[in-house]
Image (spheres, helix red, strand yellow):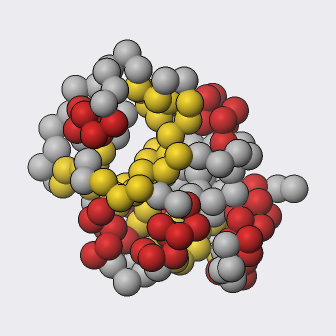
Amino acid sequence: MDTLDRVREGLARAGLDPGLVRELPADTSTAETAARAVSAPLGSIVKSLIFLADGEPLLVLVAGDRRADVKRLRGELGLSKKRMRIASPEEVLARTGFEVGGVPPVGHQAPLRTLVDASLARFETLWAAAGSGHAVFPIAYRDLLSVTGGEVLDFVEDAAQAQGGADGRDG
């Protein structure tokens, strides 16, 4: 089964329409390119970051106009710098079955603990990666929480004001 089909299957299992997945000619592998491709606000793009926490994958969903404050995230989880780090691209692929730039919130090889940026609630419609760097799907915030079983936490900073230490860079 290809990666887009895994996402479609994950959506269907959650009671959502698998037809929501949109394959696009445009690049959607970054929040900026995805926002342009679907003509949506940058903040409505769901960035999927994979961390390793005590060796286990952790899916962290962040608004496109925000950055994960890794120190704050570690503090929320009670983990030291040694116990939590951003996964390498190779680790992301091995642990999720998806490449960086196409990691969706659903359809993973195994269930992942998921943390959700509370600021995503600002938008009626969110856009998430659908398994490749050229595919996305729209989803409501409440559905994102439901489909992922995500825990809502406040662990982000405004990307325009961020100065290092975010989105996986140790600060």
Q: Is residue 125 left or right of residue 120?
A: right
User: Residue 154: percent from the left, percent from the top?
Assistant: 25, 53
Q: Quadrant of the C terminus?
A: top left
Q: Is residue 13 left or right of residue 29?
A: right
Q: Is residue 155 left or right of residue 108?
A: left
Q: Is residue 159 visible?
A: no
User: Residue 108: percent from the left, percent from the top?
Assistant: 68, 50
Say which quarter of the image contains residue 75.
Answer: top left
Of 146 and 126, nearer the camera is: 146
Image vertical order of residue 73 relative to residue 63, above or below? above
| Residue visible at 19% across and 50% down in the picture | 157
| Residue visible at 37% across and 15% down in the picture | 82
Image vertical order of residue 171 relative to residue 123, above or below? above
Q: Residue furthest front?
A: 78
User: Residue 111: percent from the left, percent from the top?
Assistant: 65, 48
User: Residue 122: percent from the left, percent from the top?
Assistant: 28, 75
